Image (spheres, rainbow, N blue to C red):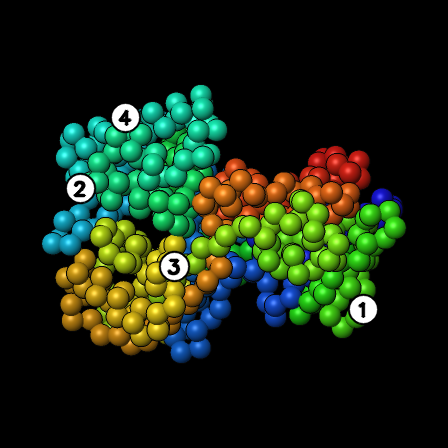
Amino acid sequence: MSEKREVVIVGGGFAGLSAGVALADRGFRVTVLERKPALGGRAYSFQDTDTGDFIDNGQHVLMGCYTQTIDFLGRIGSRDKLWVHPNLEIQMLERGGRSGFLRTAAIPGPFHMSAALLRYRLLTPRERWRVVAGAMRMMRMRGRDPRMLEVTTVANLMERLGQGERERQCFWYPIALATLNDDPGIASAGLLAEVIKRAFFGRRRDSAFVYSRVGLSDLYCSAAVEFIEKRGGSVRCHQMVQTLELDTGAAVARLRMRDRSAVEADAYIVAVPAPHLLRMLPEALSRETYFARLAGLGVSPIICIHVWLDREVTDAAFAGFIGTATQWLFNKRRIFVQHGAHHGGYLSFVISGARALVDLPNDELLAIAMKDLRAMMPTAANAKIVKALVIKEKQATMAPDLESHRLRPPTATPIHNLFLAGDWIQTGLPATIESAVLSGYAAASAVAARAGVSRAA
């Protein structure tokens, strides 16, 4: 590499910006190119002009075990924008007014989680013990036979673990949908086991829920840009990469932009979803095995329904719904520190793995969410809708099915100066913010290793 050690990163979401920050911190001159008018990728926010509230394109929750994400936010000076709930406390609601709390005890992990399960009132004592025993058996499988989990779906694993319908519906499947974003009938048991291990079988603080107290874009985008620019780099939006051009030595020579201009560097990190990457590749390169397999990666949709009501209907920061189309409810009035001019209730409903619903009209989706809300919370019976907004992300995440998980690539490519980042590359985690940041750090480390630059530098 040249003395300047110049790196171009394509994509300005969590993966691209975390890679840029890590490289700028090591003395590289970084250029981040984002095709959209604003940064954030698939984790962004915008301000609603009517209410003044900040709207996330989808509700994103962090956990204490998101160590790489929290490290990244600490580097750029944004940790004070997080709200940490030190004790895991999830209210789960069923029709008919039944509810139960998954509330951890103030004892060291992982015993704190066993205590939470053994006090979970939506399950009978026998069912609670089955969940605890099933979780412990899953951890033994993860240690002794991880390959078996990699070729098993979550639903099939539940059969092996002897989990009944109540245990699945009240505990296992809500966690699987929230973290894997897909139907347990197709989602990888290996990915669920990794989530359970990191979140519930580690330190007590690993299971803490962590929210952004501001809009997602305000959480990390501007702070990351400032970090990179202070170290001689640049971040540019409205930059559409047309293709990667190779030199005779099978290295990336330059990026050809849509306006036919060229951008050159010593190394390149592409931190965009796989379909976007495939469109950038020269035809001959796209047929190589490493890249051709990326066409087999599936995607999962998420629907987020934002509703402003004429009153607040719950004091809870969030709640899970059992047996309804809507899976999770987030009370933005209890999470955000920034409140808009409208002082009624502001709720966000999340439907993960929403293949069966994503093509429905927005008004039907709103009706479904309000029906679920009124069934679960009688306090909402007379609440009136002031405003609503439905956001559909049809390609929100990589599908966590067995084949897609098998096809996930490593960060290094056959092109020696080209590296990949994104929540969809092989990090061992489902497609989450933590996976995105982990991939960004991995790509940065690979670039630095190639240049002979240590982390300390």
**Residue drawn where x is 34% and y is 36% of the image:** 156
CA gap, disc 1 to disc 2?
A: 61 Å
Residue located farthest toward the top when viewing the structure as drawn? 144
Q: How many residues crowd mark 4 within 10 Å: few (<14), some (14–19), many (20+)? A: some
Mark 2 and mark 3 lie on one chain; the one further toward the N terminus is 2
CA gap, disc 2 to disc 3?
A: 28 Å
Return the residue nearer the eye: 434 or 133. Answer: 133
Contact? badges 4 and 3 (CB < 8 Å)? no
| Residue annotated with mark 1 | 261
Residue 155: name its quadrant.
Answer: top left
Query: Residue 91: horizontal and vertical position, in percent?
Result: 24, 47
Which numbered dot is residue 171?
Answer: none
Query: Residue 314: horizontal and vertical position, in percent?
Result: 23, 59
| Residue annotated with mark 3 | 355
Mark 1: amino acid:
Ser
CA gap, disc 1 to disc 3?
A: 39 Å
Query: Residue 451: horizontal and vertical position, in percent?
Result: 80, 39
Mark 4 and mark 1 lie on one chain; the one further toward the N terminus is 4
Q: How many residues crowd mark 1 within 10 Å: few (<14), some (14–19), many (20+)? A: few
